[in-house]
Image (cartoon, grey):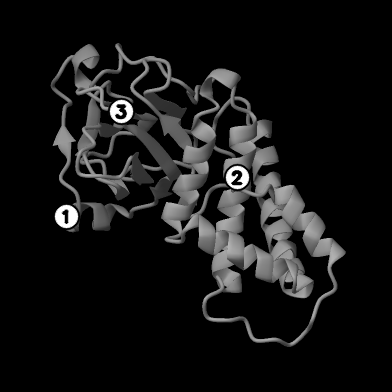
Amino acid sequence: MRTTTGLYVVLALGLLASCGKKIPDDIIQPDAMESLLYDYHLASTMSASLPYAESYKKDAYLDYVFQKHQVTEAEFDSSMVWYTRHAEELATIYRSLQERLEKEEKQMKEVVAKRDNQIDVSMSGDTVDVWQDRPLYWLSASPLTNKVVFDLKTDTTFKPYDAMELKADFHFIPSSAKQSGKAVMALNFYFDNDSVQGLTRMVTHSGMQRLYLRPDSAFAIQSISGFVYFMDEESTGTSLLVNDIHLTRYHIKEKEAVSVPDTVAVRDTSRLERKERVVGRSQIQPVRKIENRK
């Protein structure tokens, strides 16, 4: 039976700590516990905001957390019992969690401040994560929840030959050989000469997936778009968690762009009509969309 996070905290604050004891080998160690609790809190927060009709997803959110960290619910519960009896250890973990959450809160405030969805001028380093939406999505076969779409306008911090990497952790539920779900991920460049260059990839198994796209011309990039589209053609009830989403920009020097081959093949669609160049762009409606408003 799952115990709420709030109860764990109350127990931790209410019990006296015994210091200096070695953490048993069968207990989740502090660093791993911190990472697990971070995802546990995130999943609990997300599940608490679900409408009644989607309450069945609550257990799936937490099951995903346990599968991601390769622990069972029983191991988590027994570890929490140990930590609540050794409150100093748990307090140390939560202090680190608080620092992490405060840092992410600051980042979220910066995102909210950028309501025009353009890249802030301070994000001008050679390597910058420009993803501006939430890092986790639950996708199902329903047309209302089967896709994540983004469309990002560039600014003066982008340069010719800049490369982009779309990366995320895909987790099909249930994670069995019988699941029939699959996903398509795509990443596209739109240039100022009206040409488009893009990549797509079919995803059929759980794990970290990436698309790395580097322009093959010196034309200025006007915008970057892409999507993750989930489908369950056999209607087996499979769903997909897309977690830890990153959209990273890399400044590539002109000489490097000419001499170094791409690590991922690039499909050049510059000769196609715009309405045909991006898979599903005119057909797929976004669940959450990053737009630019002038």
Residue 92 screen position, x and y as percent: 73, 70
The residue labelled by disc 3 is 230
- What amino acid type should be assigned to the residue bearing mark 3? Phe
Q: Which mark is residue 261?
A: 1
Q: Secondary structure at mark 3?
A: strand
Q: Residue at x 18, y 14 (%)?
A: 273
Tell me which residue sits at (84%, 62%) in the image.
13
Residue 74, image x, y percentages: 52, 59
Q: Residue at x 67, y 65 (%)?
A: 81
Viewer-proximal residue among 262 and 283: 283
**First in sequence: mark 1 vs mark 3:** 3
Q: Nearer the viewer, mark 1 or mark 2?
A: 2
Q: Does dot 2 land on a helix, a strand or a loop? A: helix
Position in image of residue 167 (x %, y %)? 36, 46
Residue closest to the eye, 183 or 72 = 72
Instruction: State the separation of the CA atoms marked 1 and 2.
Output: 39 Å
Q: CA distance from mark 1 to mark 3?
A: 31 Å
Mark 2 Cα shell of 10 Å, populated few (<14), some (14-19), many (≥20): some
Front: mark 1 or 3 = 3
Above or below residue 215? Residue 208 is below
Instruction: Compare marks 1 and 2 and give the one earlier in the sequence.
Output: 2
Left or right of residue 112, residue 29 in this image: left
x, y (%) of residue 278? Answer: 24, 22
Badge 3 vs badge 2, beta-carbon distance below 8 Å: no
Considering depth in this image, is 43 or 176 the residue closer to the camera?
A: 176
Q: Amino acid at mark 2?
A: Leu
- Mark 2 sits on what residue? 42
At numbered mark 1, what does the secondary structure look like: helix, strand or loop? loop
Decide if residue 12 is on the left or right side of residue 122.
right
Horizontal side, residue 278 vs residue 226: left or right: left
